[in-house]
């Protein structure tokens, strides 16, 4: 928006309001259906735990499906980030149903993966299809904004946090061409998409209740600095573990279908030996249990292990949601030695590990305010920034 006249401003606002509304209806609806299908799978598997025995076969079938449709290198957040930075590579339409159905099937049978990667890919893919098949007079930069709108909408729809979704899209895209006027379309798309998901009764505010905020004094921040380093270590372990599993399996086994099959088989064996069914799928209850004060002592380790195996062997769905489970439970684990309320440390772990693994500190700060309220803002900001700095320059997005 180069001009600053009233006419140009009104045109810009109305234009992107209409575009954002259309994108939100499109993205919010398909992501809501996708999330509802996954939630249904979680419920069915809880009633029939024996379904886990089918995980190796489902994983192998999904990987084969990606190969059959030649989608191995044509889908993923890495491609969307590249398109947000000006890449001309197209997202084929077949990637939308294949990635959606593959992730839903993996969740139904217990793969320890997230769901947000495919949500952002669904949103970005749908928007890219609109750009490919319908003629609109968008500039090259506006086309980049459209993809970034999809990234924000996917995050906002998945977690119910439109402001954090906006910052997430802008932080991970890192487009050189971004100006401040890009924030408006990205935010409006994220917000309106989130509102669409609320029509499906997918998100409820106030689920997490953090108590026992400490005083803003020197020793408080000394303790926060120490635990932020530990959060950064867990974030680095998460990134390194996934990469190690990927490289190790690819070194010994050349067929990706067999790699996914063996990954699923490892999860089945671990589950049968240790009876750890609570770490299958999304494990969303882990977050609330950690903040409410009733988690398993070493839940963070088991969720970390299960997720490294599943993501590292090729199960697709997301790498972000498990970070919330791992971080919140690790925070509660640290509360045995840190002189703060357990729910407070769990909330910090929720944010700090995520910031360390993704290199998105501003997203995590706003995420904390949207989920836990503004009372702990100064603590959230300190922990997310410190964890980010201590985690190194790579993230789960750059290592894929």
Image (cartoon, rainbow, N blue to C red):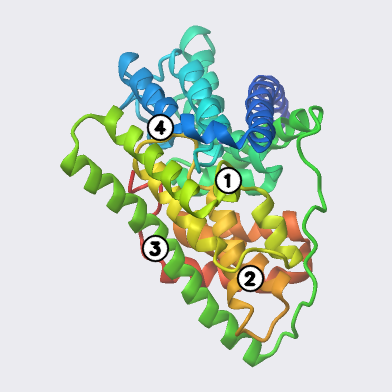
Q: Which residue is drawn at 63% across and 68% down?
A: 348
CA gap between label 1 and label 4 equals 46 Å
Residue 332 tag number: 2
Residue occupied by mark 1: 180
Looking at the image, which residue sits at the far front?
A: 273
Sequence-first tag of 2 and 3: 3
Residue 13 visible in rendering: yes
| Percent of width and height locating residue 267 | 43, 44
Closer to viewer: mark 1 or mark 4 = 4
Neighbour tally class for label 3: few under 14, some 14-19, many 20 plus, Cα within 10 Å: many
Asked whether disc 3 touches disc 1, contact meaning CB atoms under 8 Å apart, the reply is no
CA gap between label 2 and label 3 equals 19 Å
CA gap between label 4 and label 2 equals 32 Å
Residue occupied by mark 4: 56
Q: Residue at x 37, y 65 (%)?
A: 392
Position of the N terminus by quadrant: top right
Is 146 placed above or below 289 here? Answer: above
- Left or right for 294, reference 107: right
Residue 236 tag number: 3
* Residue 328 position by quadrant: bottom right
């Amino acid at each position: 928006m180069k001009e600053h006249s009233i006419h140009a401003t009104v045109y810009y606002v109305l234009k992107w309001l209409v575009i954002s509304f259309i994108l939100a209806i499109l993205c919010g609806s398909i992501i809501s259906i996708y999330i509802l299908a996954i939630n249904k799978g979680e419920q069915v598997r809880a009633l029939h735990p024996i379904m886990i025995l089918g995980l190796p076969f489902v994983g192998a079938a999904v990987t084969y499906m990606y190969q059959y449709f030649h989608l191995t290198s044509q889908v993923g957040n890495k491609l969307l980030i590249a398109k947000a930075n000006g890449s001309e590579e197209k997202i084929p339409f077949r990637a939308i149903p294949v990635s959606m159905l593959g992730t839903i099937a993996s969740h139904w049978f217990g793969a320890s993966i997230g769901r947000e990667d495919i949500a952002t890919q669904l949103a970005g893919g749908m928007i890219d299809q609109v750009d490919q098949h319908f003629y609109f007079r968008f500039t090259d930069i506006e086309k980049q904004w459209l993809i970034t709108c999809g990234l924000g909408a996917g995050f906002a729809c998945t977690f119910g946090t439109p402001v954090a979704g906006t910052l997430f899209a802008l932080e991970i895209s890192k487009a050189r061409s971004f100006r401040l006027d890009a924030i408006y379309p990205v935010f409006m798309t994220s917000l309106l998409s989130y509102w669409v998901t609320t029509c499906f009764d997918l998100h409820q505010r106030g689920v997490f209740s953090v108590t026992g905020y400490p005083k803003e004094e020197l020793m408080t921040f000394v303790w926060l600095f120490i635990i932020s380093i530990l959060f950064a270590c867990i974030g680095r372990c998460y990134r390194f573990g996934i990469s190690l599993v990927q490289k190790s399996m690819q070194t010994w086994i050349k067929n990706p279908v067999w790699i996914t099959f063996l990954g699923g088989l490892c999860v089945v064996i671990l589950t049968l030996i240790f009876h750890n069914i609570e770490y299958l799928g999304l494990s969303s209850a882990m977050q609330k249990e950690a903040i409410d004060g009733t988690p398993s002592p070493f839940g963070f380790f088991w969720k970390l292990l299960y997720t490294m195996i599943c993501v590292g062997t090729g199960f697709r769905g997301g790498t972000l949601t498990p970070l919330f489970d791992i971080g919140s439970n690790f925070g509660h684990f640290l509360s045995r030695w840190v002189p703060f309320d357990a729910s407070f440390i769990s909330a910090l772990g929720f944010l700090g590990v995520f910031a360390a693994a993704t290199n998105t500190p501003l997203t995590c700060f706003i995420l904390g305010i949207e989920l836990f309220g503004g009372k702990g803002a100064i603590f959230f900001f300190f922990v997310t920034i410190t964890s980010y700095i201590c985690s190194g320059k790579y993230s789960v997005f750059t290592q894929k």
